Amino acid sequence: LWSDSENRNRTLLRILLWTVGITGISLIYHAYAIAAPTLFLALIALLPYLIKKDRGWIDWLARRPSSDWIMTWFVIVVTVLTIIGTHFRGAEWKWIWP
């Protein structure tokens, strides 16, 4: 079996390759709305690899499974979109300030 550092390096390489691939494809088609969140999520996923701490919130994030990350992201997006849809839309769906 692989050692811990080899698993860590393989995971880091996979994250980087998928990020570059998705961002590259979205930039070819001028889909900047996909490229920006992809880079943001990749940065969050790479935080445990970039900052090595034994305690604190970085270590807490590093120990969470992907399902927790995905569900948290989903809840944040739903909350933000609901707030925008409720408070920033007026007659005929025109943008208004509250």
Image: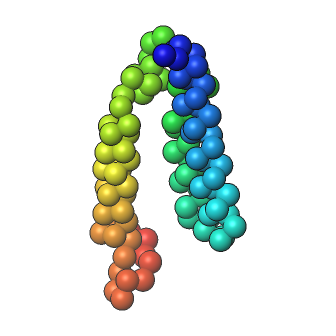
Between 88 and 59, the one lying in front of the other is 59
Q: Point out the residue furthest to the top here.
A: 54
Q: Position of residue 89 (x, y in %)?
A: 37, 76
In the picture shown, does residue 19 fall above or below 89?
above
Between 3 and 62, the one lying in front of the other is 3
In the picture shown, does residue 85 fall above or below 23?
below
Tell me which residue sits at (55%, 23%) in the image: 8
Classify the position of the C terminus by image quarter: bottom left
In the picture shown, does residue 18 fall above or below 8?
below
Tell me which residue sits at (48%, 23%) in the image: 58
Q: Quadrant of residue 56?
A: top left
Tell me which residue sits at (37%, 55%) in the image: 77
Tell me which residue sits at (65%, 49%) in the image: 20
Q: Position of residue 45 (x, y in %)?
A: 51, 36
Q: Position of residue 47 (x, y in %)?
A: 55, 30
Relative to residue 71, is residue 16 drawn left or right?
Answer: right
In the picture shown, does residue 63 fall above or below 45?
above
Relative to residue 90, is residue 55 drawn left or right?
Answer: right
Q: Is residue 25 visible?
A: yes
